[in-house]
Amino acid sequence: MARRKKIYEGKAKILYEGPEPGTLVQYFKDDATAFNNVKKDVIDGKGVLNNRLSEYFMTGLNTVGVPTHFIRRLNMREQLVRSCEIIPLEVIVRNYAAGTMAKRLGMEEGVQLPRPIVEYCLKDDKLGDPLVTEEHIAAFGWASQQDMDDILSLALRVNDFMSGVMYGVGIKLIDFKIEVGRVFDGDFQRLVVADEISPDSCRLWDIETDRKLDKDVFRRDLGSLTDAYTEVARRLGVMPKGATSMAKPKLIN
Ligand code: 5GP
């Protein structure tokens, strides 16, 4: 059997060369990391859940006309995506104060913001993904003004879609991060939502109880990450058929 060509390995995913030119296979690992790789663990089944959840959100976005890199899910852990040139920014949209913004501005977590706030961080692990302004982005040429207009519009459309979907299942979308890629069609380029959208990259709180259903469960030792992600998948109706647990089968002696 021929070995696949690995294009890139990140903290939570691996990209392999795809079956046709311009495609990649995105593999979801079970590895969980936080605080720029300082905290690490392997969470059985996380990759399977994130593959399903990201498929669900990306398919929904494609359906409502928000372009993404997602083509189709291949199996439990892999999806076929369009190859794109990732813009080196993390685009964060916030609806409620939390995380680094709450800390930076001395705000209580969970306070609703007057309107969605979009922030940009430079994708650079060595620097800890620092917050940057549009001035930095323009001056250093990480993206053009046209790109920034398109990124802002994409980010807000993703926010509208995701907020609505999550609200429908009793979950508040506190904030999320997306990555944006360039896809080239001949002489033209267009921007698409890339990477993944999953509880690894969103903050999701139960509307009634404020229970956290996202990666903060791991970051802050709040219980079982698998249970939290399974709850999101269950509410959205995207649990794999017949699955009661995402964990690998255990040998019984
Ligand atoms: P914060 O800046 O408060 O840490 O994060 C804001 C939002 O972006 C959160 O939903 C968080 O999960 C997401 N986010 C920020 N940086 C990263 C990152 O490097 N990887 C992932 N998966 N999500 C991130």
Image (cartoon, rainbow, N blue to C red):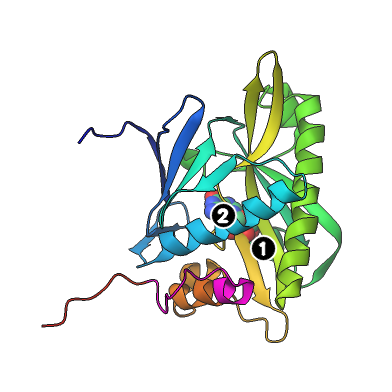
Give above or below for 23 relative to 55: above
| Between discs 1 and 2, the one toward the N terminus | 2
- Whether the magenta-drawn stretch holds residue 17 is answered as no
Tell me residue 242's x, y (percent). Answer: 43, 76
What amino acid is at disc 1? Lys
Report the Cα–Cα distance between label 1 and label 2. 32 Å
Q: At 63% from the left edge and 27% from the top edge, which residue is drawn?
A: 183
Q: At 47% from the left edge and 78% from the top edge, which residue is drawn?
A: 227
- Whether the magenta-drawn stretch holds residue 244 is answered as yes
Q: State which quadrant residue 182 falls in.
A: top right
Q: Which residue is mark 2?
A: 55
Q: Secondary structure at mark 1?
A: helix
Name the residue at the front extreme. 241
| Pointer 2 local density, CA inside 10 Å: few below 14, some 14–19, many at least 20 | many
Tell me residue 14's x, y (percent). Answer: 39, 43
| In the foreground, 96 or 159 | 159
Tell me the tag on residue 119.
none
Which portion, as a residue range, is magenta?
A: 232-246
Q: Which residue is mark 1?
A: 103
Instruction: Report whether the residue tagged 2 is closer than 8 Å to ligand 1.
Output: no
Q: At 70% from the left edge and 32% from the top edge, which residue is drawn?
A: 191
Q: Quadrant of ligand 1?
A: bottom right
